[in-house]
Amino acid sequence: MWRSFLYLGLMFASAGDAAEYTPLRLVADINPGYGSSAFIEFFVWKDQAWFVAGYEQNGKSAAALYCSDGSTNGTRRIKDIPWQRSGSMFDNPLVFEDRLYFQGPNVTLGKGSRVWVTDGTEAGTKPVSEDGTDVCDEFQPFLIGDRLVLSLHGSYEGHGLVALNLHTGVTETIAVPFDGWEDYTDGAMLNGGMLKLDLHGKAFWSIDGTKAGLKKLTLPGLPTFENDGGFHQLLAVPNGVLMIPNGSKSPLELWHTDGKTVAKLATWDRSNAEAHPHWFGRVGDCGVLLLGDHTRRCCIWSSDGTAAGSAVVLDSNPYKDASFSLPSARHPTPVVSGNRLFFTMDDGVHGVELWCTDGTKHGTHLVTDIALGAEDAEIFELFSLGEGHVLAQRKNAKSGGDLWITDGTEDDSRRLATFSRTVNISAALKDMILLVADSEQSGYELYALDVPSLPAPAGREASSGPP
């Protein structure tokens, strides 16, 4: 759910060739002195970064909701909220009718989550209900119209579904108990409802946020998908939903449904699923899959939801020695910005570098060779700015670490900053990037990197954890 920036950073020490390091501006020393703060989620709303920070107070852990425009005077503490080590603090934020909702701490139990709301004032920051009917699991809720569908667990068999009406604040029971799907399973919107695969893999469930709208769909041609720990990935595209069931097993299959029929579009045989992970997401109007298998060290598939429109975009020929750097402790998670996917790959010639694709062969290419020749660029974090730009943070043997910005072309790829300390990108505002950085004087606190030419961001979340 949340993890600490204390554990995400890389310590950049100055090396042989002295570099001119980019100055950072201290925005807020939330935990004064050398004591570090823990920053738990960032969310951009109203041209401000909203976040929960944890800190030490009289020897105990405490937390508060903050917002910041990137200036010291414009960073304000909105309200203290209960600290809890197990459960939600500031999860899954969303905006509805000029209010920010999030899954926050459950004051009564001291664990789990409740739905909180804030209008940016202390009085207007609180759990949605006084009677606790907004209590929910930590699994991500989904909003359909004005109804936030929440998952519950209890002492009964299975779990429950309720819908919180964000207009009235009333929680309505949909089904308790309910064991129709696994909480961790992805869902996708189809025909105004959320589509999820049945727990037993024999049918789909659709829900429009009401009790009457909870329906089980048994579709002709749907095989039984063995429940694999709930690891089913569903992705909405214009003509229906793409699905990869049993995503951690081999063979890996791509299916499509329009809510009436189902069809298998492709199959990949992976000799070792752990050794060949994959990434699956939407780029433009298509689903894009980054995959390594026993015949191709790497390939990119794109699908528009039809058999004719499902094809290989890039494979190991001519990139015979190519390999993806799919998410791991050393490699960044691919990110979508604009209508392109940015990822790291070794094509066997340039080392591990930044690539991008729009889901077509023509639009798939090396962005720029940051570390010239066959050396790896050592990129460990990608951050979407929206508007088709990304930030790439990397380890640099000469300077310690640096930050690059690109729009996916070599001409508009440049080094933005050079660091000699631990930094973690948190949020992008109009003309600045907010970071959590370490210093000998303040520990881990909130800093800003002023960048007058920064492209307009579309908003982004990041996460961290307890002190």
Image (cartoon, rainbow, N blue to C red):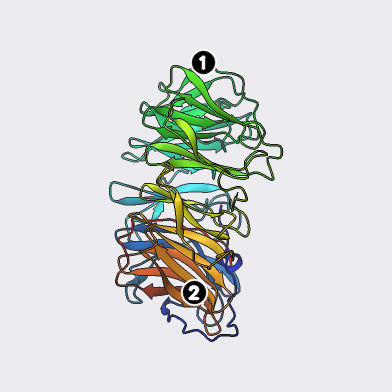
Identity of the residue furthest to the top in this view:
220
- Relative image position of residue 110 (x, y in whole percent): 58, 53
Secondary structure beneath disc 1? Answer: loop
Dot 1 crowding, Cα within 10 Å, few <14, some 14–19, many 20+? some
* Residue 148 visible in image: no
- Relative image position of residue 151 (x, y in whole percent): 52, 36
Residue 90 or 25: which is nearer the viewer? 25
Question: Quadrant of the rendered structure where residue 316 is?
Answer: top right
Q: Amino acid at mark 1?
A: Thr
Residue at point 38%, 27% (across, down) = 239
Residue 387 or 467: which is nearer the viewer? 387
- Relative image position of residue 211 (x, y in whole percent): 43, 24
Which numbered disc, 1 or 2, marks the residue that appears first in the sequence? 1
In the image, taking residue 351 as reference, residue 212 lies left or right, namely: left
Secondary structure beneath disc 2? Answer: strand
In the image, taking residue 408 as reference, residue 4 lies left or right, namely: right
In this figure, which residue is indicated by the disc labeled 2? 445
Q: How many marks?
A: 2
Vertical relation: 215 (above or below) 359: above
- Relative image position of residue 131 (x, y in whole percent): 45, 43
In this figure, which residue is indicated by the disc labeled 1? 218
